[in-house]
Amino acid sequence: MSTNLGTNLPTAAQALLSGDNLDQKAGTGFLLVSQQEDGFPHAMVLSPGEVLASDSSTLRFALFAQSSTSRNMQARPAAMMCFACDGAAYYVKCEARFLPSAAGVPEGLALFVAPIKTVLEDREPSAVVTSGFHFTDKRTPEEIRAQWDASIAAMRGAKAG
């Protein structure tokens, strides 16, 4: 059974989504679920360089501008991000808002700011969550870092205005 933690991420989850120590987070995936036009959920896996907890109650996303998820969230802002952290599964419900005039955004990306509406935690002492989505990026570490650093900098610098 999930526990409603309110609108704030716990400390361990906020650290995971901080945009810091990205090299240590390579391969970690975060499932972002948006709503398609037909009402069905649409899922995509984000890398650590595409999501940022700018504070304990706000997520930011840097998505490919032409992706289905980007289009979905511009039309229907309700979204949910799911991930594993600190022995638990988290389901973070948020309302994403497209930032159309964000300066310093790498070409081809769309930025979103998403105030958190609810953080649900699934934690069971007898069933510790040991893994969520993981992936292997075939690019060089330098290529990955360059993209992630640019995305994190854009998300940190974008005004939510």
Image (cartoon, rainbow, N blue to C red):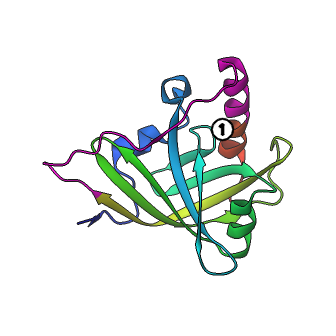
In magenta segment, residue 106: no
Front residue of this view, candidates 1 and 74:
1
The answer to whether residue 126 is above or below residue 153 is: below
Residue carrying label 1: 152
Q: Residue at x 64, y 58 (%)?
A: 113
Rendered position, 52 above or below 100: above
Q: How many marks?
A: 1
Above or below: residue 57 compared with residue 16? below
Q: Secondary structure at mark 1?
A: helix
The single residue placed furthest to the bottom in the displayed view is 38
**Image quadrant occupied by the N terminus:** bottom left
Residue 134 rendering spot, x and y as whole percentages: 48, 37
Q: Is residue 10 left or right of residue 107?
A: left
- Outermost residue on the right side: it is 107
Horizontal side, residue 24 vs residue 63: left or right: left
- In the picture, residue 161 is in which quadrant? bottom right
Span of residues in magenta: 122-150
As drawn, 157 above or below 77:
above
Residue at (67, 81) in percent of width and height:
38
